[in-house]
Image: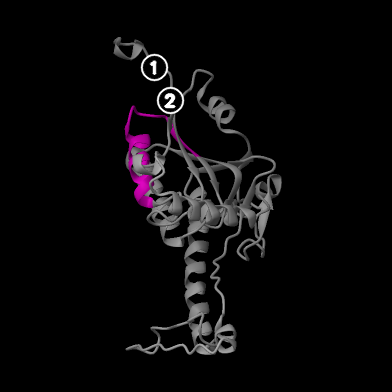
């Protein structure tokens, strides 16, 4: 009731947003710019919080969605003049770290995995299998690059070179984001941008995190013991909760599990 009583100061409030899972557009991933937009808007603009805290547990995913989410976080922080603190749980790797680097400070558990500043493209080649089965692949295009890296045709050196150029451009964009966000806190370490990962204190030592710490004690240490927390979490659509999209949910869960497994989680 004291919020309605004049001249009585309210306790500081920290808005908390949980970011759990892979990053992708549409329904393929758990995290996307579209799904997080309303949560971020509420977190920064509702009730005048003293800070926004991000609980991050993500192995990465789409570089575009990671960039959009990170840019939105920075934009809202600057518009509202509210600081952002990221707290890494199991992992903030690849796109997950891209998002974390948008925060003013990053905290990690002593067993958290951070880094993997790189870009990956994976696929398969099935042309030998088709040949053995007597299956002929027929592809018709207008534009020689339309069937680039077709998994049912032999790999083409020109296509591979083109893909490597694209991956290099994305990698440079990722590196620029991390350098912009972390600045001179980053160590002069040649392995920082090779896709290498660090655990806990090791991430602090190379500047990928600012300190070891957990959300509630760290925020109370900064803003006082009376700090209150307001949580914002994604809610699945009603039909999805009732099982109407079980096939998509199952596929998404498999992809999510595979991404976390890359880091032994």
Count the labels in the image.
Answer: 2
Asked if the magenta segment contains residue 37, the reply would be yes
Residue at which label 1 appears: 10
Q: Report if the CB atoms under discs 1 and 2 are less than 8 Å apart.
A: yes
Instruction: Name the mark on residue 45.
Output: none
Instruction: Name the mark on residue 13.
Output: 2
Q: Is residue 22 visible?
A: no
Q: In terms of secondary structure, where does tag 1 sit?
A: loop
Residue 101, x across and y down, in percent: 51, 50
Residue 172, x across and y down, in percent: 50, 68
In this view of the protein, which residue sits in the foreground, 206 or 40?
A: 40
User: What segment carries the magenta color?
Assistant: 33-54
Marks 1 and 2, how far apart at CA? 9 Å
Q: Quadrant of the N terminus?
A: top left
Asked if the magenta segment contains residue 41, the reply would be yes
Crowding around mark 1 (Cα neighbors within 10 Å: few <14, some 14 to 19, many 20+) is: some
Q: In terms of secondary structure, where does tag 2 sit?
A: strand
């Amino acid at each position: 009731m004291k919020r309605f009583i004049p001249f009585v100061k309210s306790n500081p409030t920290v808005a908390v947003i949980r970011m759990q899972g892979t990053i992708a557009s549409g329904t393929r991933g758990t995290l996307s710019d579209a799904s997080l937009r309303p949560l971020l808007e509420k977190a920064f603009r509702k009730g005048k919080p003293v800070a926004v805290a991000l609980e991050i547990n993500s192995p990465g995913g789409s570089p575009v969605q990671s960039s959009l989410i990170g840019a939105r976080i920075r934009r809202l922080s600057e518009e509202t003049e509210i600081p952002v603190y990221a707290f890494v749980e199991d992992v903030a790797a690849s796109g997950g770290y891209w998002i974390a680097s948008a925060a003013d400070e990053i905290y990690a558990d002593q067993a958290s995995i951070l880094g993997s500043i790189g870009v990956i493209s994976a696929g398969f080649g099935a042309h030998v299998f088709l040949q053995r089965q007597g299956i002929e692949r027929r592809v018709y295009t207008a534009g020689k690059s339309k069937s680039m890296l077709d998994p049912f045709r032999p790999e083409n050196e020109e296509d591979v070179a083109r893909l490597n150029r694209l991956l290099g451009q994305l990698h440079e964009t990722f590196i620029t984001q991390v350098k912009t966000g972390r600045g001179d806190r980053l160590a002069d370490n040649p392995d920082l941008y090779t896709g290498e990962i660090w655990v806990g204190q090791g991430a602090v030592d190379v500047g990928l995190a600012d300190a070891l710490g957990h959300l509630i004690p760290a925020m109370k240490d900064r803003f006082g013991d009376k700090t209150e927390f307001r949580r914002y979490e994604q809610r699945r659509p009603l039909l999805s909760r009732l099982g109407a999209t079980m096939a998509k949910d199952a596929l998404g869960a498999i992809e999510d599990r595979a991404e976390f497994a890359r880091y032994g989680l």
